Amino acid sequence: MSTSTPPSPPARSRWGAGRIVLLVLGSLATLFALALLSAAGGLFWVETQKDSDDYLRSGTYNFATPSFALESDDLDIGNDGPDWLFEEGRLATIRIEGTSTRTSPIFIGIAPRIEVDSYLRGVGHALVRDVDFDPFDYSVRPLPGGPPAGPPGEQPIWVASDSGHDAAVTWDVAEGNWVAVVMNEDGSRIVAADLRFGARVGWLVWLAVGVLIAGLLVLAAGAVMLFFGARGGPATETAGLPATISEPVGDYPVQLEGELDPQVSRGLWLVKWLLAIPHYIVLAFLWLAFAVLTIVAFFAILFTRRYPRSIFDFNLGVLRWTWRVGFYSYSALGTDRYPPFSLGPEPDYPARLDVPYPGELSRGLVLIKWWLLAIPHYLVLMFLVGGGFGWDWGWGWGWIGWVGLNGLLVLFAGIFLLFTGRFHRDIFELMVGINRWVFRVIAYASLMRDEYPPFRLR
């Protein structure tokens, strides 16, 4: 009588919810820490730009108006701060230096908004707005009227003022709503002056130190979370041990796998960006063709319900090529074997990807799946692989970008490899899982399949 060994139960994934949460939180903390450390570095750099009088100073800029006065926008200092904050210039000290570009001496004064409004009511002057220093530009809002009731220096409204061909005003910032005014000393028409602005902020270095300490603490917390999140499985030696294979699983048609090279070099990953440049150049053109051909496939599916086979094979080849280069370089660091310049399947290469050719595809889905239905996945991928966005402030463009979870994992895996000669197995599997998710979404959004991608790494 023969006996048969019962089949082994399927292996459970080592990536439980708790470990994934730790990796997610650790990655977010690390990104936040890097932002804090960058901000601290910026603040320390600003501190080094102070002059011998401890002032941060701008360049010299020309301001002019054909009317009787130049008036700044409001400097509104909130009234909710503690009194000690405004004692002896503790918050900041502002300095305005001006040189008349005409024969008339100039007057520079700072006064409460309500007092300036009373003095300049009915006076022709210009309200300076939207000052941009790089390149220098500003706009003015002309306010019609006649001459002032008297020279500015005779008015008792100023908390700080000076006059002459060269004038300089120093003012300790105080609570209230304040305005700076530049006029001719005699209150006459046509005001023109070269102005320079400065600020002395004594607490800037302490803010930099505080931000630096906060960044280091958050970085340490992120490192602890990443350590406990990633330590669940043993590390894989990179010499003399069998390779780790991340096999395709499940019934989703996009199948991606990666085989970790047992001989991954300690330091080659530091220069793979250089070695992969030929592939990056070719892939740039291939992805341009991929985008154009996907548009062609869109109309073909819309009218015939079929993805043209030749276009499908080409686009699948681009995905395979991209995965091989990513596996070699900075999507997984899984091998040192140089990727082939090929659109084919290359079954002997350790990174493989396949998408079965579909039969008929939905005409309705082709209209919405690549943008509307895929939005939840796009939001997830913003975290997994990073992203960024820009905006126009009016005085220049701003940009916020972030490194995704996979980029951080690659960095940690590379550093771990550099110092230990080992590649952490669980980090490798997580990186391959992230790439599996990415390529599922790409195949879905590029209309190659109608099956909705699962929200999972396996």
Image (spheres, rainbow, N blue to C red):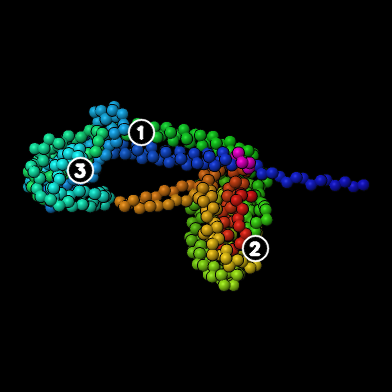
Q: What residue type is labelled 3?
A: Arg
Asked if the residues shown at circle 3 and circle 2 are in contact, with their CB atoms under 8 angstroms apart, the answer is no
Classify 10 Å Cα crowding around label 2: few (below 14), some (14-19), many (20 and above): few
Q: Is residue 272 visible?
A: no
In the rendered image, the vertical position of residue 422 relative to residue 90, given as above or below: below
Q: Which residue is drawn at 63% across and 42% down?
A: 15
Asked if the residues shown at circle 1 and circle 2 are in contact, with their CB atoms under 8 angstroms apart, the answer is no
| Residue where numbered disc 1 is placed | 207
Q: Quadrant of residue 92?
A: top left
Pick whichever of labels 1 and 3 is earlier in the sequence: 3
| Residue where numbered disc 2 is placed | 356
Q: Can residue 249 be seen in this view?
A: yes
Classify 10 Å Cα crowding around label 1: few (below 14), some (14-19), many (20 and above): some
Residue stretch in magenta: 15-19
Q: Which residue is drawn at 55% across and 53% down?
A: 377
Give the distance between the C-alpha atoms of the residues marked 3 and 2, in whole angstroms: 68 Å
Give SS at disc 2.
Answer: loop
**In the image, residue 150 lies at what x, y percent?**
7, 42
Q: In this view, does 122 lie to the left or right of 388?
A: left
Q: Residue at x 61, y 57 (%)?
A: 452
Give SS at disc 1.
Answer: helix
Q: Is residue 433 left or right of residue 72?
A: right
Depth check: give the residue in front, 143 or 316.
143
**In the image, residue 101 lies at what x, y percent?**
12, 48
Q: Residue 455 carries which label?
A: none
| Residue where numbered disc 3 is placed | 196
